[in-house]
Amino acid sequence: MVLFKEMALDESIQKGVAELGFVEPTPIQEKVIPKILASKQDIIALAQTGTGKTAAFGLPLIEMTDVANNNVQSFVLSPTRELCIQIAKDIENFSKYKEDLRVVAVYGGAAIDVQIRKLRKGAHIVVGTPGRVLDLIKRKVLKINSIQWLVLDEADEMLNMGFKEDLDSILAGTPAEKQTLLFSATMPKEILRIADNYMTDPEEVTVGKKNAGADNVSHEYYVAHAKNRYEVLKRIADMNPSIYGIVFCRTRQETKEVAEKFMDDGYNADALHGDLSQVQRDMVMQRFRSRHLQMLVATDVAARGLDVNDLTHVINYNLPDDLEAYIHRSGRTGRAGKSGVSISIVHTRESNKIKSLQKIANKSFTKMSVPSGKEICNRQLFNLVERVEKVEINEEQINELLPEIYKKLEWLSREELIKHFVSVEFNRFLSYYKNAPDLNADIKASDEKGKVVRKSQRGFTRFFINIGNKNNLNPGKLIELINEKTNTNDIEIGKIDIMKKFSFFEIDKDHDKKVMNALNDNVEFEGVNLIVDRSKPEPVGARFKERSKERSGSKPRSRSRDSFGKGRRSDDRGKDKGRPKRYDR
């Protein structure tokens, strides 16, 4: 076992680390810190979020900084404001006892003049987000042309957020002889491009398996019809009374809708999405970090860079379009050696997605049964009893009232008193979940001839549309197009297949005429007049390939990762008003 005190770090750094309670480095720290200190070779470090990557690069940067030199010596790029602030704060804590070391964080959403003043006073280590960094470079306030160390933290996230051009512009202005340290949870092709263009013979250091999920996170999924997705979410929350987690949705609108329903139903929750101002976002995060909120409903973009400890659950209300984003989502729980659970709610047409996720995360996923009303009531009852058992008693005030209370309740026996007490809190759950339906759904079904067919054939109409990925179409854009032209987001959309020059999608059969008329009403997409027509239901096997070949005149293309569908529906808001309020949260 290697200890921090055995590493070649200055006594002032050792003192700061010890004060923070760090004794034994994490695997990524144990592998990377000695390499940075001993060599100028570029390094690509692959490890999951929450494994201590900040200390892995932060400690050696502090060690190697010459405080007598007032120029920027180390430059750290991070994808989000929250992560930028957290990295700078951590480095400041590590260097608490190293005199005169100056760390400056620069990020959007804050006054740029304050950051400019700090930079002009001198900074040894600068941590920034791409947009603000590029702005400061153009203003000739931030000078990175003589830096010695460049760190790209969460590099895959920066690329996912669309910072490719900003990164190229920033990296092009850095000196060739610097040491570049790239940290990432996954290794997509764009990371390899950055390595090829801006790194020199980098050494790859991997902790765990490349692109794999964290070892202390269990992965579960529930299969339900898309229209029941919100009901399943509520049951998961009710089955875990002490849950502290993030619910991931695909779009801003869906995030708002789910959060509003959650709050209307008495859950201690709020939303985090791109329409919030920075002040609103900070308020929501402050409440969540202090546990005044129990659940945060968020989009991938809004949640990137969040650094929240002790999350018990991550819930995928919808699986991400880019399945590698699942690694980042699930990595937000199970940090610092603690266990966590990543839960996915999938509809009946997403069985292939689960198989793909298992390969990407290199983990087995457990299919769970949606809890029944009886199971939830039992769990809530024992949670109530446990809370009563552990509640703190104010002896001074209670003792004054006890004689009158004893007199009022003396006609009840011990057993009857317990029944009455429990029923005050518990009758609401019993009433709400009385005769609760079974929400579990089967992934496959058989047709009349006994042949296995796709579940999506039942209750859905399949359409052909004359645009594909050649026209920059993806599942998200198709869903937005349907919602926009039909002026609603209540239509359930089934499986989507994006081909090169055309696509197929499924619509709830009750709305097929509405969609057909809306998309054929002189609608254009990327300069193409849309042609939408009903198609035969998709069979399993060769007939789909034959149809692709017939349409394209060439060999059928294999379906890409974007070819997975989305079940989406906004249920009536008044539907759940009978549910017991969750003020006890």
Image (cartoon, rainbow, N blue to C red):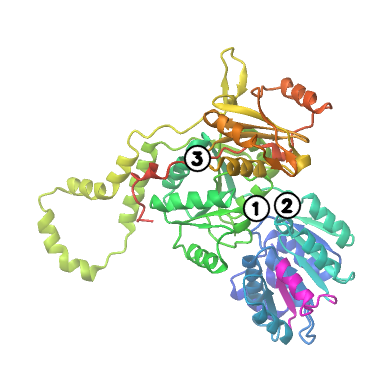
The picture quadrant where one finds residue 429 is top left
Please tell me whether residue 231 is drawn above or below residue 24 in the rendered image.
above
Q: Is residue 253 above or below residue 22?
A: above
Please report contact status of discs 2 and 1: CB closer than 8 Å, yes or no.
yes
Residue 211 position, x and y percent, is: 72, 49
187 horizontally vs 305: left or right: right
Please say whether residue 340 is visible from this viewpoint. no
Question: Does residue 236 appear in this view?
Answer: yes
Q: Amino acid at mark 3?
A: Arg
- The residue beneath circle 2 is 186
Q: Residue 298: x percent and y percent?
A: 55, 54
Task: Check the picture and name the quadrant holding the C terminus.
Answer: bottom left
Q: Earlier in the sequence, mark 1 or mark 3?
A: 3
Q: Which residues are magenta?
A: 122-146
Residue nearest the viewer, comparing 206 with 326: 326
Q: Is residue 326 above or below residue 95?
A: above
Residue under the point 39% across and 38% down: 375
What residue does disc 1 label?
328
Mark 3 residue element: helix
Residue 501 highlighted magenta (yes or no)? no
Residue sitting at the far top: 449
